[in-house]
Image (tube, helix red, strand yellow):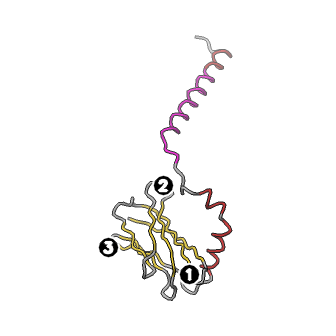
Amino acid sequence: MKFNWGTGIVLFFTLFASSMIFAVVSTTKHPPQLVQKDYYALDLNYQDRLERKQNTAALAAMPKANYSEASKSIKASLPEDMVANKGSVKCYRAATTREDKSTSLDNANSADISVADMTPGRWHIEMEWETSDGKKYFWENTLIIP
């Protein structure tokens, strides 16, 4: 067989078409999950979240989130001198939204989150709370769960 312009064009378009088909098939096998389910609402309320972060940065002591190997849980707590009317703790992974966990703060201004059903890896911890005077706070941290 002689290799000429016609043969080259046919080979090029055949390779191009097969690579496009491969790309479409491989992308449809991957589930299109977002880092967070409500990212549109988070984007619209960016200024509110920025003000909450600034309120948190002005605190004398920061909240804490620690992983305990003994109890296989994450303990998230507010500073000792702070009392919150309401608050929540959210754990999420950037890899999937199916494993997101959310819980509220208890009377001791802390939350214990079991990691028994959480995939090992990098987790983002977000805390939001409001004090009795109506001031709102937001704090985030990253933990590695082995």
Does the magenta portion include 108?
A: no
The structure residue drawn at horizontal position 62% and vertical position 83%, both measured from the top left corner, is 58
How many residues crowd around disc 2 within 10 Å: few (fewer than 14), some, or many (20 or more)?
some
Q: Secondary structure at mark 3?
A: loop
In-image side of 15 versus 108 (left or right): right
- Please state which of the two labelled residues, at mark 2 or mark 1, is closer to the viewer: 1
The magenta span reads 11-32
- Please state which of the two labelled residues, at mark 2 or mark 3, is closer to the viewer: 2
Rendered position, 97 above or below 123: above
Q: Earlier in the sequence, mark 2 or mark 1?
A: 2
Q: Earlier in the sequence, mark 2 or mark 3?
A: 3
What's under tag 2, amino acid-wise?
Thr
Q: Which mark is residue 71?
A: 3
Q: Position of residue 109 (x, y in %)?
A: 46, 80
Q: Quadrant of residue 137?
A: bottom right
Rendered position, 50 above or below 55: above
Cα separation, mark 2 vs mark 1, equals 29 Å
Q: Secondary structure at mark 1?
A: strand
Cα separation, mark 1 vs mark 3, equals 29 Å
Asked whether disc 1 touches disc 3, contact meaning CB atoms under 8 Å apart, the reply is no
Residue annotated with mark 1: 131
In-image side of 108 versus 15 (left or right): left
The structure residue drawn at horizontal position 61% and vertical position 61%, both measured from the top left corner, is 42
Along the line of sight, which residue is nearer the eye, 11 or 71? Answer: 71
Q: Quadrant of residue 48?
A: bottom right
- In the rendered image, the residue lying farthest to the bottom is 81
Q: Which mark is residue 97?
A: 2
Rendered position, 77 above or below 1: below
User: Where is the N terminus found, in terms of image quarters?
Assistant: top right
- Please state which of the two labelled residues, at mark 1 or mark 3, is closer to the viewer: 1
What's under tag 3, amino acid-wise?
Ser
